[in-house]
């Protein structure tokens, strides 16, 4: 890989990173919103590195015969026409190979670097959506209760529906000694995942702590409501159905909700909890 | 070593069309334009086709791993290039104890100050070796810095609010593994296994050397990061986490299984504590193994290490680290948890 292709690849990569952070907000599909400044900084560094390389190459193309460029002088080792010189018989590289090798020869990079095109193509061509019903379905085991202290929950108002995150609902359903959810209306926001059982479906939200690779599905089973298609974003209002026995240990079945109202909504800005 | 360098070159396939054409500079803007055109046309032609949920889920996880690791990689590469270009080699001989066996624990403990995840530590360790730091000491730093730095310690404390001992165990076990691996490498390792990147001091401007080192390291490490991201995303989508439940109750097996899971999932060390905390069915010792092994051995790290230090290094270093990581987790878990 010669210096021109390297710079070009860096421009593409930096451009792709800036595309998902500056030109759009798709980065929230992959990482926490707070991560944006770091991503922008990284994208700018990569882009600048590539552009500087391109400008350098434009001014002083590293073609044999035109004389070595300034950078070549600086590191003082790699011949200008490195890509031609990858063959076994070519004298300059072979000679150089005896002195110092690999790490130092900065104008040559292993061909693995071309793989950096893959995320660029994935970002531009697939533009991956946030994790949805497919990812949530493959995870049959319901998610664990969040590690909150049991007495940390504030009482809910009796007269109106309270909006809460799925994580909080699950935490209250499983870990709340005061049973603060009982007979209170709540509104949950998430996407629809169908269930293997006919009488229910799941309102689901992926919980992410760092990036989408570590996301786990938070599910609440919804009863008494028509199931919208998978991946539809909905607001479900209803009341918690307390388990009939205490015999089922927490974390083996999702908590249940008797729905009174299901509203379709557009996807929220932050798809993960 | 020179033999290997030559051998590496001889097996290399001649460059592809781009590489060859690129030596004629005026052609390159056209190639650049062609790639842009491909992306634009592809957006119209291919994007409506690429909508299978499995593919999209895979792509989301793959892009997430790459995007998440990239800032850390850039940071690590910046630091490594700065070490190469601006820190004189004499600094390291003064900063570290002269005796290699003493240098290993010092370098391991120094890992506590570099905030970053594992992607940053590989280029930094390689930069340290290039600057004449004993490889074993640089390796101890490579292993300890993603596991015991302040950010990771705080994240672990947040993820295990009721178990402060988990933080202590993680710190101790990780540092112990890093130092032990360093010592084992010092005692039994051969220099021919490790491809130490040699970088003589730049003769010209330090900035040009800095830029060159950075571009090289970024592309090189980035390529291998993608290899790791590809594998981890595939496993993430293909292997359901549900089957884990069946082994959770078995004492030693569950420790090994969570160690292996840490390798496969390749979660950033700053996030793995939250995932470990979510594996409620497992014993604390098994979770500790997840936290100790994860930052030291995982798919994207293996790819990065093989790419940076050579394959013959990785096939010895990775199993050694994994086994010591499991062993240390069991011992520390027995004592503290």
Image: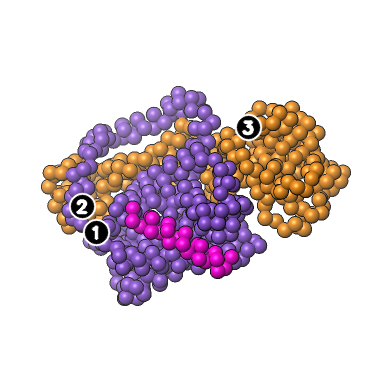
Chain colours: A orange, B purple
Relative to residue A259, is residue B246 drawn left or right? left
Q: Main secondary structure of the magenta part?
A: helix
Point out the stretch of residues depicted in magenta: B315-337
Q: Is residue A252 above or below residue B129?
A: above
Labelled pair 2, 3 in contact (Cβ < 8 Å): no
Task: Give the SS element for disc 1.
Answer: loop
Q: Write the residue at 74% across / 52% down.
A: A175
Instruction: Tell me the residue at 72%/32% (across/down).
Output: A200
User: Foreground mark, 1 or 3?
Assistant: 1
The answer to whether any part of residue B213 appears in the image is: no
Q: Are marks 1 and 2 in contact (CB under 8 Å)?
A: yes
Quadrant in which the C terminus of chain B is drawn: bottom right
Q: Residue at x 14, y 52 (%)?
A: A95
> Residues at marks 2 and 3, common chain?
no
Chain containing the residue with disc 3: A
* Percent coordinates x, y for residue B248 in the rendering: 58, 51
Which residue is under mark 2? B4
Q: Please tell me whether mark 2 sits on a helix, a strand or a loop.
A: helix
Labels 2, 3: front one: 2
> Residue at the spot x=41%, y=52% of the render?
B301
């Amino acid at each position: 890989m010669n210096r021109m292709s390297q710079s070009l690849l860096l421009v593409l990569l930096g451009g792709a990173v800036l595309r998902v952070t500056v030109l759009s907000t798709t980065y929230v599909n992959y990482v926490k919103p707070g991560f944006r400044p770091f991503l922008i900084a990284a994208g700018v560094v990569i882009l600048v590195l590539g552009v500087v390389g391109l400008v350098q190459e434009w001014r002083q193309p590293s073609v044999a015969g035109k004389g070595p460029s300034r950078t070549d002088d600086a590191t003082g080792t790699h011949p200008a026409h490195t890509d031609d010189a990858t063959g076994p018989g070519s004298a300059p590289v072979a000679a150089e190979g005896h002195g110092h090798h690999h790490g130092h020869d900065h104008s040559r990079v292993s061909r693995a670097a071309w793989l950096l095109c893959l995320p660029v193509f994935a970002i531009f061509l697939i533009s991956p959506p946030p994790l949805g019903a497919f990812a949530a379905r493959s995870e049959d085991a319901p998610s664990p209760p969040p590690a909150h202290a049991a007495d940390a929950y504030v009482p809910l108002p009796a007269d109106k529906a309270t909006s809460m995150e799925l994580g909080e609902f699950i935490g209250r359903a499983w870990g709340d000694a005061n049973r603060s959810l009982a007979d209170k209306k709540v509104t949950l926001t998430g996407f629809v995942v169908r269930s293997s059982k006919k009488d229910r479906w799941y309102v689901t939200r992926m919980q992410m702590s760092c990036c989408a690779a570590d996301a786990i599905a938070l599910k609440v089973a919804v009863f008494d409501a028509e199931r919208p298609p998978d991946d539809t974003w909905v607001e479900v209002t209803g009341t918690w159905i307390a388990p009939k026995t205490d015999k089922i240990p927490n974390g083996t079945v999702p908590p249940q909700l008797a729905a009174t109202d299901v509203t379709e909504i557009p996807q929220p800005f932050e798809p993960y909890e | 070593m020179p033999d290997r360098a030559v051998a590496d070159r001889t097996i290399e396939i001649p460059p592809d069309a781009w590489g060859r054409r690129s030596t004629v500079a005026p052609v390159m803007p056209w190639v650049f334009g062609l790639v842009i055109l491909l992306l634009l046309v592809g957006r119209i032609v291919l994007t409506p086709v690429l909508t299978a949920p499995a593919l999209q889920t895979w792509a989301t996880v793959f892009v997430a791993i790459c995007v998440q690791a990239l800032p850390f990689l850039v940071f690590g590469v910046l630091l490594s290039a700065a070490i190469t270009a601006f820190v004189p080699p004499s600094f390291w001989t003064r900063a570290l104890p002269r005796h290699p066996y003493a240098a290993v624990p010092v370098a391991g403990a120094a890992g506590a100050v570099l905030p970053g995840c594992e992607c940053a530590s590989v280029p930094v360790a390689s930069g340290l070796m290039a600057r004449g730091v004993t490889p074993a000491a640089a390796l101890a730093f490579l292993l300890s810095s993603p596991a015991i730095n302040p950010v990771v310690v705080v994240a672990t404390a947040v993820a295990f609010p009721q178990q402060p001992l988990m933080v202590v165990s993680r710190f101790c076990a990780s540092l112990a593994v890093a130092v032990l691996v360093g010592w084992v490498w010092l005692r039994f390792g051969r220099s021919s296994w490790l491809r130490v990147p040699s970088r003589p001091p730049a003769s010209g401007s330090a900035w040009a050397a800095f830029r060159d080192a950075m571009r090289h390291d970024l592309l090189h490490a980035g390529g291998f990061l993608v290899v790791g991201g590809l594998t981890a995303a595939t496993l993430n989508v293909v292997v359901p986490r549900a089957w884990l439940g069946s082994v959770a109750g078995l004492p030693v097996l569950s420790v090994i299984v969570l160690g292996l899971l840490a390798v496969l999932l390749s979660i950033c060390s700053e996030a793995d504590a939250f995932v470990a905390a979510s594996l409620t069915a497992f014993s604390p010792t098994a979770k500790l193994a997840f936290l100790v092994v994860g930052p030291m051995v995982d798919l994207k790290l293996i790819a990065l290490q093989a790419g940076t230090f050579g394959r013959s290094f990785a096939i010895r270093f990775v199993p050694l680290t994994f086994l010591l990581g499991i062993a240390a987790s069991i011992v520390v878990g027995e004592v503290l948890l």
